[in-house]
Image: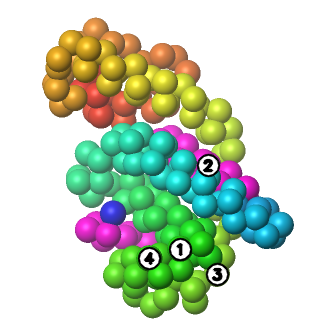
């Protein structure tokens, strides 16, 4: 993410709103846990978000847009990185500060604690299970047939409920 310039703003697509709504949920849950002096919840939920949702699904869905300079994808990638670093700073202070200084300058510990982003429809989170299931099913089908993940895959239709994310899903899986 830090290899991409951070735009001041960007036109968000449904995929961007989806991951930002997930980040909003993570932020609200983590802030509540920190207020209750519970470090277990934010540290584990951040790990789950990063490794089970953000990296394998969102990053892969928007990779082509990011390399093409799409400001919505780039802004969202940085918003997620900034949010995760600030959420994890109390439990991994040195690593988060090192990454923050390298990517953004200054110290993560001088930043405000994150809060949910305004204007992101919480209803986008309703698609999470379907997005994860769809991506996993395509990856499994390609793996079962010995196909490369980068291979074009004909004959797959995007389920109606995932059509708002269709452009990114088609590009990610090379569906034709």
Of the numbered discs 4 and 3, the one sitting upstream in the chain is: 4
What residue do we see at 49% from left, 60% from top?
80
- Give neighbour class at mark 3: few <14, some 14-19, many 20+ (Cα, 10 Å): few
Q: Which quadrant of the figure contains the C terminus?
A: top left
Of the numbered discs 4 and 2, the one sitting upstream in the chain is: 2
User: Pointer 1: what residue?
Assistant: 92
What residue do we see at 37% from left, 60% from top?
74
Numbered marks: total: 4
User: Pointer 4: what residue?
Assistant: 95
Specify the segment rendered in magenta: 2-29
Where disc 1 sits, the SS reads loop
Where disc 3 sits, the SS reads loop
Q: Is residue 22 above or below residue 79?
A: above
Q: Are marks 4 and 2 in contact (CB under 8 Å)?
A: no
Tell me if 100 is positioned left or right of 38 in this view: left
What residue do we see at 26% from left, 45% from top?
64
User: Pointer 2: what residue?
Assistant: 21
Q: Nearer the viewer, mark 3 or mark 1?
A: 1
Residue 158 seen from this side: yes
Where disc 4 sits, the SS reads helix
Q: Which quadrant of the figure contains the N terminus?
A: bottom left
Q: Which mark is residue 57?
A: none
Q: Quadrant of residue 169?
A: top left
Of the numbered discs 3 and 2, the one sitting upstream in the chain is: 2
Q: Is residue 10 magenta?
A: yes
Tell me if 121 is positioned left or right of 147 in this view: right
Q: Are marks 4 and 1 in contact (CB under 8 Å)?
A: yes
Q: Give the CA distance from mark 3 to mark 1.
A: 16 Å
- Give neighbour class at mark 4: few <14, some 14-19, many 20+ (Cα, 10 Å): few
Name the one closer to the observer, 126 or 72: 126
């Amino acid at each position: 993410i830090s290899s991409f310039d951070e735009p001041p703003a960007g036109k968000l697509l449904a995929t961007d709103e989806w991951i930002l709504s997930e980040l909003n949920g993570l932020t609200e849950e983590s802030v509540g846990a920190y207020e209750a002096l519970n470090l277990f919840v934010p540290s584990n939920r951040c790990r789950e978000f990063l490794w089970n949702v953000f990296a394998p699904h969102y990053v892969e869905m928007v990779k082509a847009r990011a390399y093409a300079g799409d400001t919505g994808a780039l802004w969202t990638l940085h918003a997620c990185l900034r949010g995760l670093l600030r959420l994890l700073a109390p439990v991994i202070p040195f690593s988060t500060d090192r990454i923050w200084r390298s990517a953004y300058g200054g110290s993560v510990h001088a930043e405000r604690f994150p809060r949910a982003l305004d204007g992101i429809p919480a209803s986008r989170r309703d698609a999470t299970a379907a997005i994860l299931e769809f991506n996993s099913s395509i990856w499994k089908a390609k793996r079962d047939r010995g196909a490369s993940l980068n291979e074009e895959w004909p004959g797959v239709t995007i389920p109606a409920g995932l059509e708002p994310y269709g452009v990114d899903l088609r590009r990610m899986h090379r569906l034709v």
